Image: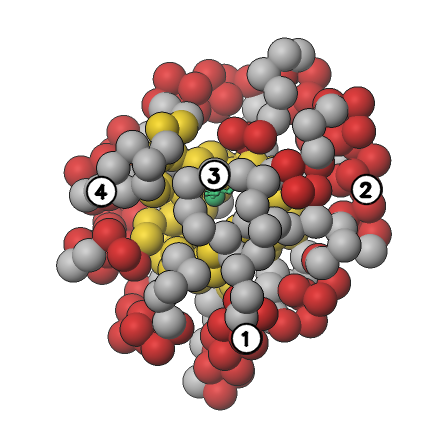
Amino acid sequence: MSRQLSVSMMCIDFGNLSDVLDMFREEHVDYLHIDIMDGHFVPNIMLGVSYVDWLRKVTDIPLDYHLMVEDPVSKLDWFPVRKGDIMTVHAESGWNALSALIHIRKLGAKAVLAISPQTPVSSVIHLLNYVDGVCIMLVIPGYSGQTMILGMEDKIKELAKYRDEKNMKYFIEVDGHVSEKNARELEDCGADIFVAGTSLLGRAPKNYRDKIRAFYST
Ligand code: DX5
Ligand code: ZN
C-alpha cells in the first residue's frame, strides 16, 4: 500500500476553508481526519456532527473519523458515513469496542481500532480479525502539537510483524506528531496511513500545499 495522508481538520484554519478543501483535492489528499472529542474520554471538546455534515456537502474526499468518546456505539449512526470512509474507535473505550467495530463494518466504512500510547499491541490481538486497520496513537489523544511518546516505533513494528506472520491485511495508521521529517522512518516501521496536523502543516495556510507535497515526496 502506498503512503497515504489524512489531514487533521481540527488543525486547519477555518478561514477560507472551501479554498483549502479544493487545494486538498488538487493535491490528492487521501482522507480528511475528523477528531471527535467529547470532553470525557479525552479532556478536550472538538468537531461535531454539523461540521461533518457541511464537509460532506462541499467535498467528496473520504472522511477518516477518529472517535475519542465514551460509548462510541451509541454515536456511530450520528455521522454521514460513506463507503470508503474510515471510522476509528478506541480500544480503551472498553467492552463495546468490539460491538463498535462490527457496527462500523455494517455501515460500510473501514473499521479501525485505535490504541493510545499506554495500551500494548498484545492487548488487542484478539480484536484484529474484526478490523480493517489499526491506528497507533503516537501522542496522548486530545491535543495537537505534541511530541511523540518514546517507544511508538516499536509498537508499529510489532503490529507489522504480526500482520506478516499471520498473513493479515489490516493497514496501520499513525496519528500525532507526523511530519515530512519522520514519515519515511514511520513508513519503514510499517505505517501506511499518516494523520498530519500542525506537525506537518504548521499554522499558516499559505504553506499547506508545499507541506503536503513535501510529505508525498520524501
Ligand atoms: C490528537 C489528534 C490528532 C492531532 C494531530 O488527539 O488525534 O489527530 O490532530 O495533530 P498534530 O499533527 O499536531 O500532532
Ligand atoms: Zn486523530
Comparing 35 with 177, the one in front is 177
How many other residues sit within 10 Å of disc 2, few (<14), some (14-19) or many (≥20)? some
Q: Which residue position is annotated with label 4?
A: 70
Amino acid at dot 3? Tyr
In space, the residues marked 4 and 1 are separated at their CA atoms by 28 Å
Q: Is residue 143 left or right of residue 75?
A: right
Earlier in the chain: of badge 4 and badge 1, it is: 4
Question: Can residue 166 be spotted in the picture?
Answer: yes
Mark drawn on residue 154: 1
- CB-based contact (under 8 Å), mark 2 and mark 3: no
In space, the residues marked 2 and 4 are separated at their CA atoms by 36 Å
Q: Is residue 194 left or right of residue 129?
A: right
- CB-based contact (under 8 Å), mark 2 and mark 1: no
- CB-based contact (under 8 Å), mark 2 and mark 4: no
Kindly give the residue lying farthest to the bottom in the view shown. Answer: 165
In space, the residues marked 4 and 3 are separated at their CA atoms by 17 Å
Question: What residue is at 76 percent from the left and 54 percent from the top?
Answer: 181
Depth check, mark 2 against mark 1: the one in front is 1
Q: Which residue position is annotated with label 3?
A: 143
Q: Which residue position is annotated with label 2?
A: 213
Earlier in the chain: of badge 2 and badge 1, it is: 1
Depth check, mark 4 against mark 3: the one in front is 3
Q: Secondary structure at mark 4?
A: loop
Earlier in the chain: of badge 2 and badge 4, it is: 4
Question: What residue is at 50 percent from the left and 72 percent from the top?
Answer: 155
- The N terminus, quarter of image: bottom right
Q: Is residue 145 left or right of residue 44?
A: right
In space, the residues marked 2 and 1 are separated at their CA atoms by 27 Å
